[in-house]
Structure formats: structure tokens, C-alpha cells
Amino acid sequence: MSMGERLRDLRLRRAISQEEVARHIGITRSAYSHYEINNRQPVYDTLIKLAAFFNVSLDYIIGGTRPNAKSDVLTPPDTKEILYLLQTMNPEQRTKSLDLIADFMRRELRSGGSG
């Protein structure tokens, strides 16, 4: 699988647009589109941003066989989804969400975690 195919697959798994990926990593949609169709190769800094955004290793993006073997072993699947959601929120949304989670956890601890 080519780098472009991997990027496209990672993006489609998240059901997001090329525009969203490009905006998050600080490039144009057109530049990102060229990566997916293998017309251009991202520079090193962009590769790092892509790996972080998709939560995979650089090795996977450039041709490795496993998306992120170490992370898959250490983190439950929900953790990746939670991190992705937090990364896509604006600061106010992130603060409110973290406050809600903290409130929920405090209530659970007080009630003995039964609920």
C-alpha cells in the first residue's frame, strides 16, 4: 500500500474530509490531496503532524505494516477516539468536556462506582 493510500484509508476511517485534515496540520487542501494521490511527498515536519493527527507511527505512514503496534497494546480503543475528539474541539469545548468528565468521575467515586 502506498503512502497516499494509507493516508486516504486513515482519513476515511475517521470519516473526515481532506479539508479537515489539511486545516488541522496547517497545509492547504490541495497539498493534502496531492499526498493522497501520490503526486507529492510530504516534508518531514508534515509527516510528523500527519502521524500525530492520525495517531499512527511515522513508520506506518511511510510503509510499515502496523498502524501503531505499541499504542495498540497500551491503550484501549476508546482512548484513541476520546483523544481524537478532544483534539478536534476548540479550547472552550475541550474545557467544558473535561469538566463534565471530571464531574462524572467525582460522582462515580462518591457513589462507589456503581453506575
Image (cartoon, rainbow, N blue to C red):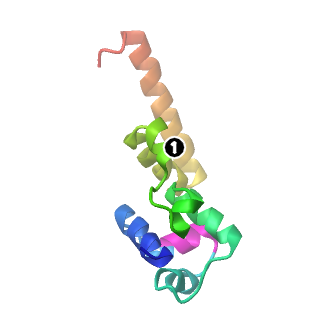
* Residue at (51% x, 68% y) in the render: 63
Residue at 59% from the left image edge and 61% from the top image edge = 58
Please state which of residues 76 and 109 is positioned toward the viewer in this rendering.
76
> Could you say where residue 93 lies in the image, as x and y percent from the top left?
52, 49
Residue sitting at 47 percent across and 78 percent down?
4
| 100, 78: nearer the viewer | 78
Amino acid residing under circle 1: Lys
Viewer-closest of 18 and 99: 18
The image quadrant where one finds the C terminus is top left
- Among the 4 quarters of the image, the one containing residue 77: top left
* Label 1 crowd (10 A; few <14 / some 14-19 / many >=20): few
Can you say whether 12 is above or below 53 in the image? Answer: below
User: Is 31 on the left or on the right of 36, as rendered?
Assistant: right
Type of secondary structure dominating the magenta stretch: helix
Above-or-below relation of 28 to 61: below
Residue 22 sits inside the magenta stretch: yes
Question: Pointer 1: what residue?
Answer: 70
Rendered view: 73 above or below 52 = above
Q: Is residue 75 above or below residue 44?
A: above
Locate residue 41 relative to residue 69 in the image: left or right: right
* Residue name at image x 45 percent, y 56 percent: 66
Query: Residue 62, percent across and down?
Result: 55, 69
The magenta region covers 20-26
Report how many numbered discs are placed on residues in the image: 1
* Residue 15 x/y as whole percent: 35, 66
Q: Is residue 23 magenta?
A: yes
Quarter that holds the N terminus: bottom left
Identify the element where label 1 is drawn: helix
Q: Where in the figure is residue 18, as x and y percent of width and height?
A: 46, 76
Quadrant of residue 114 within the rendered picture: top left
Residue furthest bottom in the image: 39
| Frontmost residue, 103 versus 80 | 80
